């Protein structure tokens, strides 16, 4: 990966302890978690991403390897076949069936898209808007700015939970318009973590959370304020919406379901 050249920028790493939430006396305390965020050039975000990997623990588990009790999985989109690139029909099951990594995806929109043109194939005006963190493919929902990620034991239909999940975003102009929400197996929100705005032209941000145990069954990613289409313009080009796309996903190895409780935390 050829790094984008900027001056070094600030990496934000925040620890979020959940034990001070107001809750009924009969409700168990929620799990603690660490929030890891960064904003800046590719070198800055790569350094924070390495810290996030270390916090998850273990090694990178190869695609199609069987479920294991430690380590992490990663998705960077660049190995997606040409036939499934630059089309609005990327399979939601690809990363649990074709390339077994324990992830199913869905969207309230009309489809999913892995794109090698920085989405210029959708809208020529976006040609210089988005940069790839790990060149050159990027990811986005079609007809929506939201993607849901559900976890399975890799390559199986068995529901799973992960210790943590993080995502690299490209071109976040507005702080808090982009966020990742984390849910347990009962659908209870564990955390809602906003992305900072990027620093520098076409910069990157990273949002991740690592819990003290595998408890995250689902994440909901909101990328900016609107879906991409043939006419929409980013706020940085005098448009009315902040347009954001995604690059790398990094998450803990999916584990069997534990018992969960009701709690939530927003940051």
Image (cartoon, rainbow, N blue to C red):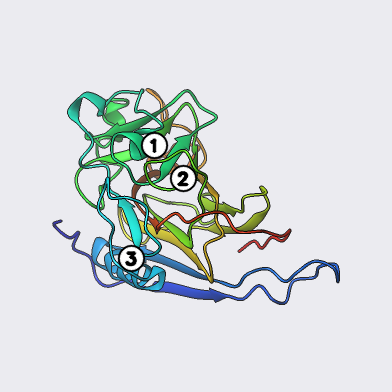
Alpha-carbon span between mark 2 and mark 1: 21 Å
Residue density around tag 1, few if under 14, some if 14–19, many if 20 or more, within 10 Å: many
Q: Position of residue 61 (x, y in %)?
A: 28, 57
Q: Where in the figure is residue 91, as x and y percent of width and height?
A: 36, 28
Percent position of residue 60, x then y? 28, 61
SS for callout 1: strand
Say which of 80 and 224 sits in front. Answer: 80
Q: Give the mark nearest the N terminus, 2 or 1.
A: 1
Q: Count numbered badges in the picture.
A: 3
Q: Is residue 78 above or below residue 231?
A: below
Q: Is residue 102 left or right of residue 4?
A: right
Q: Which residue is mark 1?
A: 140
The residue that mark 2 highlights is 152
User: Vertical placement of 78 versus 83: above or below?
Assistant: below
Q: Earlier in the sequence, mark 2 or mark 3?
A: 3
Which residue was labeled with disc 3? 49
């Amino acid at each position: 990966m050829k790094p984008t050249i900027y001056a070094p920028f600030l990496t934000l790493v925040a620890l979020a302890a959940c034990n001070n939430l107001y809750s009924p006396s009969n409700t168990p305390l929620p799990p603690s978690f660490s929030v890891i965020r960064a904003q800046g050039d590719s070198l800055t975000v790569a350094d924070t991403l390495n810290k996030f990997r270390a916090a998850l623990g273990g090694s990178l588990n190869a695609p199609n390897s069987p479920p294991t009790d430690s380590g992490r999985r990663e998705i960077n989109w660049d190995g997606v076949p040409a036939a499934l690139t630059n089309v609005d029909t990327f399979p939601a099951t690809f990363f649990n069936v074709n390339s077994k990594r324990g992830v199913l995806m869905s969207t309230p929109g009309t489809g999913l898209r892995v794109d090698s043109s920085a989405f210029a194939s959708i809208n020529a005006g976006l040609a210089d808007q988005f940069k790839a963190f790990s060149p050159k493919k990027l990811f986005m929902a079609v007809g929506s700015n939201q993607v849901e990620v559900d976890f399975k034991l890799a390559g199986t239909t068995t529901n799973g939970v992960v210790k943590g999940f993080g995502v690299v975003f490209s071109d976040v102009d507005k702080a808090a318009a982009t966020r990742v929400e984390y849910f347990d197996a009962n659908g209870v929100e564990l955390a809602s973590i906003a992305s900072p705005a990027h620093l520098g032209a076409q910069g990157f941000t990273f949002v991740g959370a690592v819990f003290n145990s595998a408890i995250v069954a689902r994440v909901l990613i909101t990328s900016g304020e609107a879906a991409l289409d043939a006419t929409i313009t980013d706020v940085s080009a005098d448009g009315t919406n902040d347009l954001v796309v995604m690059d790398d996903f990094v998450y803990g190895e999916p584990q069997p379901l534990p018992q969960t409780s009701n709690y939530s935390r927003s940051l």
